[in-house]
Image (tube, helix red, strand yellow):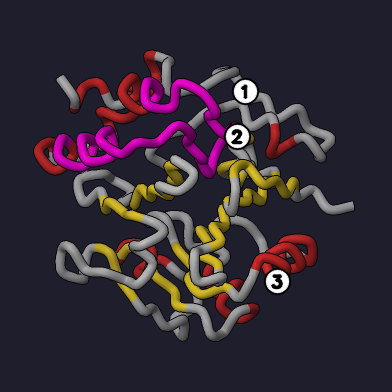
Amino acid sequence: MSETVIREVAKDVWTFSRPFARFGLFPVGGRSTAVKMQNGSVWLLASTTPDTETKAKLEELGPVQYIIGADAVHHMFLSDFKKAYPEAKVIAPKAAIERVEDKTLKFDGVWGSDPAGTKYGFEDDVQHCYFSGFKNKDVAFFHPASKTMIQADLLFNLPPTEQYSKSSSSGRVPLIGSFGPFSWIHSKFASSMGEDNEAMKRDVRTVANWDFERIIPCHGDVIESRAQDAWKAAYKSYLS
């Protein structure tokens, strides 16, 4: 039986949640997120395997037009999704492109190389903010229609209960237990991942000014309440 949990978290926003252990040891979970755009096609943050169930739901939603890599380390399945949806455009940070194993994979947009303010064609549905000063070169996304922020490694909400709900594992993180945006350890993590303080202040404030009520992380449970507070708590060192 598939371990993928597929859920519509808001109108036209679907998540694909699966077990995933960092270094094979620490259960952090994995999640892809699909947004059905106004033109009927699909924008996909691709961070889990395109298994049969995932592809069936995506094909039900509409043609996949964009395959998104969210940061330097969320690149494992970009090539697999491109093979499944060859007409889709692949867009990712430069740091992810440098690490991707499939060197034949062609990219249609590159955060970190393209000029600031570059438009990729999905901005009427999904806004984006590239964190050039963050170690993993993450991109945060905002879907105004559902007031949802989507991101990979900028914010965690562990344990990954939903992502392990079809697994024999509890998904509890050894030694840590929980690692959420309101914990002191998360604010320390956020500070430690910043490589350019001014760039971080700029981009953290850009996201803080988005009108979101929900945060979909790649790792951990979806934040359905106090989402703005969660972001500001995790990144308080850049907002003071």
Q: Nearer the viewer, residue 6 or 198?
A: 6
The numbered mark, 3 or 2, whose residue comes first in the sequence reads 2
Q: Nearer the viewer, mark 3 or mark 2?
A: 3
Left or right? Give the position of 41 relative to 139.
Answer: right
Q: Could you tell me which residue is drawn at 34 percent across and 36 percent down?
A: 211
Q: Nearer the viewer, residue 109 or 209?
A: 209
Q: Nearer the viewer, residue 169 or 155?
A: 155
Res 32 seen here: no
Q: Where is residue 168 shown, x and y percent of the image? A: 84, 35
Which image quarter: residue 182? Answer: top left
Where are the magenta residues, as a range? 201-230
The residue under label 2 is which amino acid type?
Answer: Phe
The numbered mark, 3 or 1, whose residue comes first in the sequence reads 3
The residue under label 3 is which amino acid type?
Answer: Glu
**As drawn, which residue projects farthest toward the right?**
1
Q: Which residue is mark 1?
A: 174
Q: Which residue is mark 2?
A: 26
Q: Where is residue 148 shown, x and y percent of the image? A: 46, 42
Q: Could you tell me which residue is drawn at 65 percent across and 78 percent down?
A: 84
Residue 147 sits above or below residue 187 on the image: below
The residue under label 1 is which amino acid type?
Answer: Pro
Q: Which residue is mark 3?
A: 59
| Residues under numbered marks 2 and 1 in contact, where contact means CB atoms less than 8 Å apart | yes
Left or right? Give the position of 123 relative to 238.
Answer: right
Residue 131: say if magenta: no
Residue at mark 3 to residue at mark 1: CA–CA distance: 37 Å
Q: Secondary structure under badge 2?
A: strand
